[in-house]
Image (cartoon, rainbow, N blue to C red):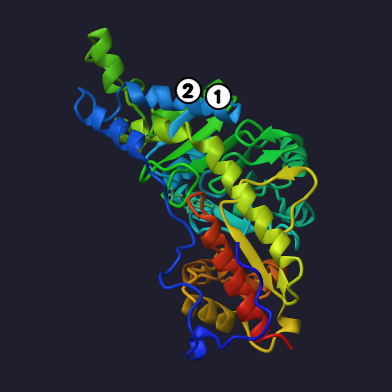
């Protein structure tokens, strides 16, 4: 991989030559011929939607994350909605969550007519700070909804201590963290319900798709009904038993994942171990390369965590730079490095400000993080040359703007 620049080069944003000719995205899927073949086989079969691939994918996925049950959904957002429903969150209730996430995490609480309450995050991981969560617990708290930001598992033991004491569920939004480990155990069977997304930038893709894993049989039954209009059996079960009768027992949705998508998921699952290993290799390379770059703070990893590295969010150290994050971002884009920002704190989106009167300064750690964050490209299909380009561009840009 390329070495760090030894002298200041003219930045592409100032008319210099970009580090890369073509833009490197921050994330993208990797599909191979076996994935394509798996989908083609389903397209030629009898079942396009809920058929044999759904159950097979759920079983293998549950085994992979070391949970008893897995229920598939049409997206991670649908899976979050189902988990909020199964948690019994309803009008008048509150669920404590993090502002440092994609808005879908908090939106699922709104879908249930309840109120998301934002607790600030810890400065190192940008995951929910248990001390801040404690301050937000109230008689209306019906669940805690944690996020494994960037793939680093949340402070699960501390959060479980709160939820167990109150008899409420911990929902873990692990949409970034498939394969992430907490105290040596994969996320998926630790919280009461764990939610995954199969969007193309994630570790495993089905196009759109999601999953909830749990060890609780009753929650599993509720989740299955919720994704199928609240009906007590699915069409395939009825066909195989020769029955026409069904009952709608709760108000659900059509959140089913297709057999086409599940065939792709099964094929992708076979490559998940290699994919995770590659992401960890890239993260280790970034960490080693950036240790010596003043003005840049790489993500920190706690002793109890082995992150899944969905994102690689660095923070720029504004005290050591002559420009703000926006300028660094634009300069990296000009070098053809497809950087991104995760996330605008959810409470600061216009909808949340308008509905709940949220203001700047409510979650100072998350807000300060947001001002400094830049997500570097991180996906398993990156070549060593791609990784080298990112290191070279980041070092070039940061050193140009160093005080
Ligand atoms: C933390 C988090 N939660 C939920 C979601 C929603 O997942 P999906 O896009 O599959 O609906 C995402 C998607 O990016 C996410 O990053």
Residue 119 occupies quadrant: bottom right
**Residue in the image at 63% along x and 41% along y:** 180
Whether residue 15 is situated above or below residue 75 in the rendered picture: below
Q: For this rendering, which residue is in front, 322 or 368?
A: 322
Q: Residue furthest top?
A: 241
Let me know if residue 51 appears in the view: yes
**Residue in the image at 75% along x and 83% along y:** 320
Whether residue 80 is situated above or below residue 10 in the rendered picture: above
The spot of residue 398 in percent (x, y) is 65, 79
Residue 214 occupies quadrant: top right
Q: Are marks 1 and 2 in contact (CB under 8 Å)?
A: yes
Q: For this rendering, which residue is in front, 194 or 18?
A: 18
Q: For this rendering, which residue is in front, 179 or 291?
A: 291
Could you tell whether 355 is left or right of 4 in the image?
A: left
The spot of residue 293 in percent (x, y) is 73, 73
The spot of residue 82 in percent (x, y) is 46, 39
Could you tell whether 66 is left or right of 70 in the image?
A: right
Let me know if residue 147 appears in the view: no
Q: For this rendering, which residue is in front, 53 or 244?
A: 53
In the rendered picture of this protein, how many numbered marks are placed on residues?
Answer: 2
**Residue in the image at 49% along x and 44% along y:** 80
Look at mark 1 in the image and give the residue it sits on. 63
- Badge 2 crowding class, 10 Å Cα cut-off, few under 14, some 14 to 19, many 20 or more, is some
Q: Secondary structure at mark 2?
A: helix
Look at mark 2 in the image and give the residue it sits on. 59
Whether residue 273 is situated above or below residue 9 in the rendered picture: above
Where is the N terminus found, in terms of image quarters? bottom right
The spot of residue 83 in percent (x, y) is 51, 39
- Badge 1 crowding class, 10 Å Cα cut-off, few under 14, some 14 to 19, many 20 or more, is some
Gap in angstroms between the C-alphas marked 1 and 2: 6 Å
Could you tell whether 309 is left or right of 167 in the image?
A: left
**Any mark on residue 90, and which?**
none
């Amino acid at each position: 991989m390329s070495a760090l620049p030894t002298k200041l080069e003219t930045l592409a944003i100032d008319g210099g030559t970009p580090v890369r000719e073509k833009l490197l995205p921050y994330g993208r899927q990797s599909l191979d011929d076996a994935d394509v073949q798996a989908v083609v086989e389903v397209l030629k079969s009898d079942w396009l939607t809920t058929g044999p691939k759904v159950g097979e994918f759920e079983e293998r996925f549950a085994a992979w994350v070391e949970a008893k049950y897995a229920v598939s959904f049409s997206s991670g957002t649908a899976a979050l909605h189902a988990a909020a429903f199964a948690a019994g969150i309803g009008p008048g209730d509150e669920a404590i969550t993090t502002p440092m996430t994609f808005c879908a995490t908090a939106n699922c609480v709104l879908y249930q007519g309840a109120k998301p309450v934002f607790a600030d995050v810890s400065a190192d991981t940008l995951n929910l700070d248990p001390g801040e969560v404690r301050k937000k617990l109230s008689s209306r708290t019906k669940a805690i909804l944690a996020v494994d930001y960037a793939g680093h598992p949340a402070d699960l033991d501390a959060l479980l201590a709160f939820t167990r004491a109150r008899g409420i569920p911990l929902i873990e939004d692990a949409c970034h963290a498939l394969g992430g480990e907490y105290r040596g155990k994969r996320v998926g069977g630790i919280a009461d319900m764990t939610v995954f997304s199969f969007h193309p930038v994630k570790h495993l893709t089905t196009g759109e798709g999601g999953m909830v894993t749990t060890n609780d049989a009753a929650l599993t039954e509720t989740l299955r009904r919720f994704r199928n209009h609240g009906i007590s059996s699915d069409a395939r079960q009825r066909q195989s038993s020769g029955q026409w009768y069904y009952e709608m027992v709760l108000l659900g949705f059509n959140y089913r994942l297709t057999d086409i998508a599940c065939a792709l998921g099964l094929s992708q699952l076979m490559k998940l171990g290699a994919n995770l290993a590659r992401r960890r290799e890239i993260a280790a390379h970034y960490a080693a390369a950036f240790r010596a770059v003043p003005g840049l703070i790489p993500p920190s990893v706690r002793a109890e965590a082995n992150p899944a590295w969905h994102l690689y969010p660095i923070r720029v150290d504004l005290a050591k730079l002559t420009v703000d994050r926006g300028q660094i971002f634009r300069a990296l884009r000009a070098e053809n490095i497809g950087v991104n920002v995760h996330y605008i704190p959810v409470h600061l989106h216009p909808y949340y400000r308008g509905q709940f009167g949220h203001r700047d300064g409510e979650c100072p750690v998350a807000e300060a993080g947001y001002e400094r964050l830049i997500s570097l490209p991180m996906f398993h299909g990156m070549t060593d040359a791609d990784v080298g380009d990112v290191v070279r561009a980041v070092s070039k840009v940061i050193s140009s703007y160093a005080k």
